[in-house]
Amino acid sequence: MDKSSKSVDLDHIDRKIIAALRRDGRMTVTDLAKEVGISKTPCQVRMRKLIDTGVIRGFRAVVDPASLGLDHVAFTEVKLSDTREEALSAFNAAVRELPEVEECHMIASSFDYLLKVRTADVRRYRMVLGEKISSLPHVASTSTFVAMETVKDASS
């Protein structure tokens, strides 16, 4: 079953579980159950259902990229030379293989994709752009916007 294509019915308890886990994914089931107002076993059953249906896609550590020396962020517009389904699929598969690309979004605009690229510095970004992004299937042109400061992101 394709978990991403099916809407899941969520009640107010499910939504409280999701909100609590988004704030603290390491919360124990006991603490989670207490916070949402149900006992431990039903809480575990609901969590399992949220995981099995793909509502909760996983748990991970949120790492400070600057502490890893990855504090250069650029947004790259990508225009493709071919936008037929086969070309899009080839681009999608190839871009998923680039560790420097944190996010890739197909855009309804004058360009086709918007990439969020994280590197150590502008020199490294220039190498990634020239050697990797520009070499992706069907890339016709790119345009870059460098982030000066991150005011809000998913972990904020």
Image: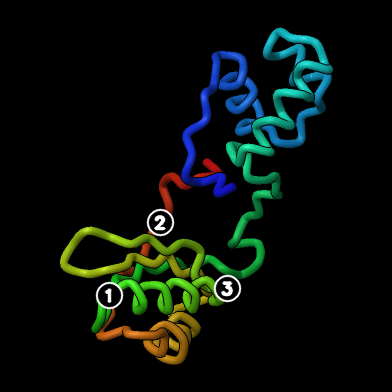
Q: Classify mark 2: helix, strand or loop.
A: loop
Could you say which is closer to the camera, residue 81 or residue 64? 81
User: Which residue is located at x 37 percent, y 60 percent?
Assistant: 105
Residue at label 2?
A: 149
Label 2 is placed on what type of residue?
Answer: Glu
- Residue 45 position in % (x across, y down): 76, 24
- Residue 113 position in % (x across, y down): 32, 67
- Residue 52 position in % (x across, y down): 68, 38
The relative height of residue 46 versus residue 135 in the rendered view (above or below) is above
State which mark lies toward you, 1 or 3: 1
Label 3 is placed on what type of residue?
Answer: Pro
State which mark lies toward you, 3 or 2: 3
Could you say which is closer to the camera, residue 61 or residue 93? 93
Residue at label 1?
A: 84
Residue at label 3?
A: 99
- The answer to whether residue 26 is left or right of residue 143 is right
Quadrant assignment, res 86: bottom left
